[in-house]
Image (tube, rainbow, N blue to C red):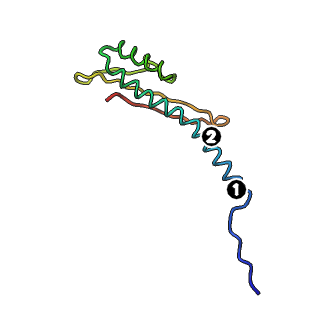
Amino acid sequence: MKLKQQQRGMTFLGLLIVGILLAFAGVTLARMVPTYIEFLAVQKAVQKASAGTTVAEVRGLFDKAAQIDDITSISGKDLEVGKQGDRVVVSFNYTREMPLMGPAYLVMKYAGSSE
């Protein structure tokens, strides 16, 4: 008499749990991508703004670029402007909080400079 082979695979409950985890990860990733795209736009705007010679000019150039690229997380007044030799160095630092569920938040910290 042949013995039945033991079945292998995933139960329905296991499949349901994996599906829920993948859906949660997908939703979280879909919420993170726009903040990263905005961070790339901020870096580009900071590079453009570093062409200015005075603090007011640098902030004005950044605000114009931010208006074009729809940057809302940071403005020209939040920039740190300094000099390194003959070059103007512009740096920034900001955080974005995304609510996950209940009291849980995902905090994204972004920083960069025109160096």
Q: Which quadrant of the figure contains the N terminus?
A: bottom right
Q: Earlier in the sequence, mark 1 or mark 2?
A: 1
Residue 15 versus residue 2 in the image, above or below: above
Look at 66% across and 53% down and name the residue there: 18
Q: Which mark is residue 15?
A: 1
Whether the residues at callouts 1 and 2 have beta carbons within 8 Å, the answer is no
Look at 44% across and 31% down and name the residue there: 40
Q: Residue furthest right?
A: 1
Look at 59% across and 32% down and name the residue there: 98
Residue 83 versus residue 27 in the image, above or below: above
- Residue 70 in the image: state x and y as whole percent: 51, 22
Q: Is residue 32 left or right of residue 10?
A: left
Q: Is residue 113 left or right of residue 2?
A: left
Q: Which amino acid lies under the numbered mark 2 shown in the image of this protein?
A: Val
Tell me how far mark 1 sits from mark 2, CA to CA.
18 Å
Q: Is residue 14 left or right of residue 46?
A: right
- Residue 88 in the image: state x and y as whole percent: 29, 21
For the residue carrying disc 1, how many other residues have a C-alpha within 10 Å: few (<14), some (14-19), or many (20+)?
Answer: few
SS of the residue under disc 2: helix
> How many numbered marks appear?
2
Determine which residue is flagged by label 2.
Answer: 27
For residue 76, which quarter of the picture? top left
- Residue 95 in the image: state x and y as whole percent: 50, 29
SS of the residue under disc 1: helix
